[in-house]
Amino acid sequence: MISMIWDKEKYNKIKDYFFRNSEKKYLEFNKKICNSNYPMIGVRTNYIKRVAKEVAKTDVLSFFLVNENKYYEEVLLEGFVISNIKDFDVVMQYFNKYLDKVDCWAICDMLCSSMKIVKKHKEFFLLRIEEYLKSEKQYIVRVGIVLLLQYYIEDKYLNKIFEITDSLNREEYYIKMAVSWLLSICYIKYQKETETYLKKCKLDSFTYNKTISKICDSYRVNKMDKERLKKTRR
């Protein structure tokens, strides 16, 4: 795509590309739903992913030096570049630094869903996740929860997830919503185990009721189970 070594001139070509492909209606839509403090250009995510995939093939270290992180799309681009890097050590070097730039649910969730490298290093990342969950920053905690959702809902980690959600005593809205999302997917994949957990869980009422709502919103849950669950709302 672009020369292996990045400088400001080459980097500005990416910004020009984003501005040329911006859409006013999409910009206004994104501003309303993303709740980010970064100004937005209004380019669709598929354009950003396309660029990130190519950037990851170049000298990414020089790219990180020139990336301005001024716009929402630039921050998202850096996250996608990190998730496309094959070298595990380089990924971790920049992933942890990047977390401080995550300021909304959209950046968090798209970053986590693109971090396929977690699949190959689950035990390592689980330790990291436990550290993220201790953070005072809402979106770093959410990163930990969404990583669990994306890569850990399986037999081996199910009880660990329940242990985490029971002990995670946080008041922030986007943390509570992530927990309810996580547990709703647990229910879809492990109905019996998750329903047993919900009967004795320590979740606050808001998170519990949101979990029930998200389960009932799923087309993968039958009507009879939905009706039964609705009766357990607090």
Image (cartoon, rainbow, N blue to C red):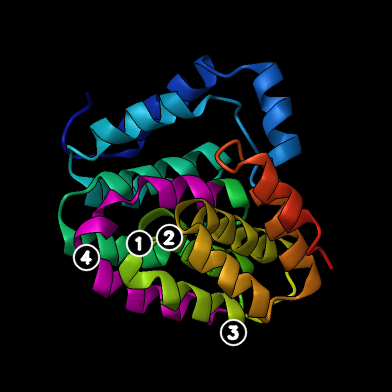
Name the residue type under label 3: Ser
| Mark 3 / mark 1, whichever is N-terminal | 1
Q: Which residue is nearer to you in this view: 46 or 16?
A: 46
Residue 168 position (above or below residue 221): below
- Name the residue carrying label 4: 121
Which residue is pictured at 61% across the width and 64% down the height? 179
Residue 194 x %, y %: 54, 66
Labelled disc at residue 75: none
Which residue is pictured at 37% across the width and 43% down the height? 80
Q: Which residue is nearer to you in this view: 199 or 50?
A: 199
Left or right: residue 130 versus residue 164 is left
Residue 169 x %, y %: 67, 82
Residue 100 x %, y %: 51, 65
Name the residue type under label 4: His
| Mark 2 / mark 3, whichever is N-terminal | 2
Mark 3–mark 1 distance (CA, rounded to whole Å): 20 Å
- Name the residue carrying label 3: 167
Q: Magenta stretch containing residue 125, yes or no? A: yes
Secondary structure at badge 3 equals helix
Q: Pick the quarter of the image with the N terminus.
A: top left
Which marked residue is nearer to the observer: mark 3 or mark 1? Answer: 1
Secondary structure at badge 4 equals loop
Q: How dense is the environment of label 4, judged by Cα within 10 Å: few (below 14), some, or many (20 and up)?
A: few
Q: Which residue is nearer to you in this view: 119 or 139?
A: 119
Read off the magenta span. 107-135
Q: How dense is the environment of label 2, judged by Cα within 10 Å: few (below 14), some, or many (20 and up)?
A: many
Which marked residue is nearer to the observer: mark 2 or mark 3? Answer: 3
Whether residue 71 is visible, yes or no, is: no
Q: Magenta stretch containing residue 99, yes or no? A: no
Main SS category, magenta section: helix
Labelled disc at residue 154: 1
Name the residue type under label 2: Leu
